[in-house]
């Protein structure tokens, strides 16, 4: 059973500088997360631990061609106010028409998150007055949302070790449908604010997570897993850089056994990396405030990514009255399952929960399990393949086209291709080396046409340094990365990287190395067999990596025994 809260995970947190300023130069202390789910840095006395509590509210933009209650098109970066209907602008006499696609996407998400789908849900008006909210209220689902009581399982590394994955679960309180607001563009130079209503009325799913997390690492892992699920379902593209996934984090600290402390809300975090930093910083800020005799205010804060700290936005001491009321222009939303579906009903006019459930795709957790079962790779490798955009498909394409075993292919994908992709800020879909070309290179290795990767399995551990990036394969990979359209075989011939097949030539090179290394030869004959590894390395150097390490070892052993 998955545990909630942290389990032996250490999270780095930032300190607050003198005078309340932000300092991200170095961590002030480490926050340990215990198995029961609380962050427990020691107090100043060294005796009083602190427990941190983190809950999340996540707004995901629904993938739909039109808005939630109007026919206006949804398009990122369209010219300002070019996608605004009369209803979006809240002109008198306009009425909402519910978008069926948005309902189905929300039901699908609720099912994927193990929620109970309410067959009857209600819409409400939430009143507040922002310049980018023309109606003065937002249509949402405060009383009876479309989905409730779900859960999300996610994994993270224990002690930053990929080989030690910990699975945790966060409860989902509810998922509700609601409108997005417009966007305020502040022009400080002219002391004015401009309003763009293109986003006003775009359909959102708000996923409310219970406060079951205790540090930034857990919050980030949970949001990343949710992002993968949404993208797998197609219910949201969840591109954070485009504002399609925005996170509000509610954070408080308390002593174990005592009531929860006063919470602060960090609004509109648009990066998973920033989410982890914001949560950890806010935990540390609250602990320091309380240890210095101060109080934590119930306030809304923002995360300043440049300074690496949270800053106040507005206080919540005087609780805002949203004056919730039933939406008079929308009837209750009625959903059906196979049992309750009326006879002779037009299926285009209803939403069938069971029909949606039957069409759920494999979720990320299922994909990971299948990768392990099908290819025999390690669970942590499957985690990376699924979490990196497009990498799983790239891996499977290579496996289909190469004779190399999947366990060896995974090394190339994760150790070499992925490191190059990250170095150049690319995804697998943007790789200059196609799956076909990488498979072609691996076939050359497997067939012994260039330096063999058999060195990884057949020689002692010291030879692992030659395993993946031996001289010839490294050069071929680097040439392929340039994207000049050459095939691996063409590069091998052009650079003269073929494996030396002439045994007599190899024997001459080995003999030359033996003759030059009298000290090492004496050590080997004296019983120190490990020194032969040095001789193998010298032979490989002399041949520019074009010698088969296994064959070289056999020749050296034969000559040294004579």
Image: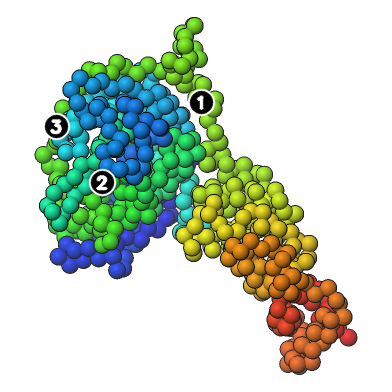
The residue identified by callout 1 is: 357
Q: Nearer the viewer, residue 64 or 36?
A: 64
- Spatial CA distance of label 3 from label 1 is 38 Å
Residue 121 shown left or right of residue 193 in the figure: right
Answer with left or right where residue 76 lies relative to residue 162.
left
Return the x and y of residue 250 as percentages of the image width and height: 27, 44
Numbered tag placed on residue 199 in the rendering: none
Residue at 67%, 44% in the rendered image: 374
Location of mark 3 (residue): 321
In terms of secondary structure, where does tag 1 sit? helix
Residue 107: horizontal and vertical position, in percent?
Answer: 42, 27
Between 527 and 352, which is closer to the camera in this rendering?
352
Horizontal side of residue 349 vs 489, given as left or right: left
| C-beta proximity under 8 Å, tags 3 and 1 | no
* Residue at image point 17% right, 52% down: 187
- The local crowd at label 2, few if under 14, some if 14 to 19, many if 20 or more residues have their Cα within 10 Å, is some
């Amino acid at each position: 059973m998955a545990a909630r809260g942290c389990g032996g995970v250490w999270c780095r947190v930032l300190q607050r500088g003198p005078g309340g300023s932000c300092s991200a130069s170095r961590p002030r202390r480490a926050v340990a997360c215990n198995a029961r789910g609380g962050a427990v840095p020691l107090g100043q006395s060294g005796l009083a631990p602190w427990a941190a509590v983190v809950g999340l509210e996540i707004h995901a933009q629904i993938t739909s061609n039109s808005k939630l209650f109007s026919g206006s098109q949804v398009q990122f970066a369209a010219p300002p106010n070019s996608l605004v209907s009369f209803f979006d602008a809240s002109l008198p006499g306009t009425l909402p028409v519910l978008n069926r696609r948005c309902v189905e996407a929300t039901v699908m998400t609720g099912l994927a998150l193990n929620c109970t789908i309410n067959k009857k849900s209600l819409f409400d008006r939430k009143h507040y007055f922002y310049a980018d909210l023309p109606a003065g209220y937002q249509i949402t689902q405060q009383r009876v949302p479309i989905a409730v009581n779900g859960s999300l399982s996610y994994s993270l590394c224990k002690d930053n070790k990929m080989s030690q994955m910990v699975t945790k679960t966060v409860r989902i309180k509810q998922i509700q449908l609601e409108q997005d607001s417009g966007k305020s563009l502040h022009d400080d130079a002219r002391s004015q604010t401009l309003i763009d209503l293109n986003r006003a009325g775009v359909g959102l799913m708000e996923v409310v997570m219970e406060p079951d997390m205790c540090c930034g690492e857990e919050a980030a892992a949970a949001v990343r897993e949710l992002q993968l699920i949404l993208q797998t379902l197609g219910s949201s593209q969840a591109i954070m850089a485009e504002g399609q996934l925005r996170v509000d984090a509610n954070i408080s600290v308390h002593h174990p056994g005592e009531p929860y402390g006063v919470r602060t809300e960090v609004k509109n975090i648009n990066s998973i990396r920033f989410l982890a930093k914001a949560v950890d910083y806010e935990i540390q800020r609250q602990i320091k405030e309380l240890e210095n005799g101060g109080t934590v205010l119930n306030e809304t804060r923002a995360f300043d990514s440049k300074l690496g700290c949270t800053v106040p936005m507005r206080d919540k001491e005087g609780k805002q009255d949203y004056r919730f009321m039933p939406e008079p222009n929308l009837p209750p939303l009625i959903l059906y399952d196979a049992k309750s579906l009326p006879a002779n009903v037009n299926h285009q006019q209803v939403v069938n929960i069971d029909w949606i459930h039957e069409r759920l795709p494999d979720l990320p957790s299922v994909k990971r399990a299948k990768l392990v079962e099908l290819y025999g790779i390690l669970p942590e490798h499957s985690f990376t393949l699924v979490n990196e955009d497009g990498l799983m498909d790239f891996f499977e394409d290579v496996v289909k086209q190469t004779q190399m075993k999947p366990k060896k292919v995974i090394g190339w994908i994760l150790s070499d291709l992925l490191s190059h992709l990250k170095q150049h800020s690319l995804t697998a879909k943007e790789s200059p080396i196609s799956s076909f070309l990488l498979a072609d290179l691996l076939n050359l290795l497997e067939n012994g046409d260039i330096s063999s990767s058999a060195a990884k399995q057949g020689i002692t551990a010291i030879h692992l340094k030659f395993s993946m990036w031996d001289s010839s394969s490294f050069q071929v990979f680097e040439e392929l990365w340039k994207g000049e359209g050459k095939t691996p075989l063409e590069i091998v011939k052009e650079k003269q990287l073929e494996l030396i097949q002439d045994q007599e030539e190899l024997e001459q090179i080995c003999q030359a190395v033996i003759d030059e290394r009298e000290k090492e030869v004496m050590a080997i004959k004296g019983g120190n067999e490990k020194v032969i590894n040095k001789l193998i390395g010298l032979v490989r150097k002399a041949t520019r990596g074009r010698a088969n390490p296994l064959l070289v070892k056999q020749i050296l052993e034969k000559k040294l025994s004579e």
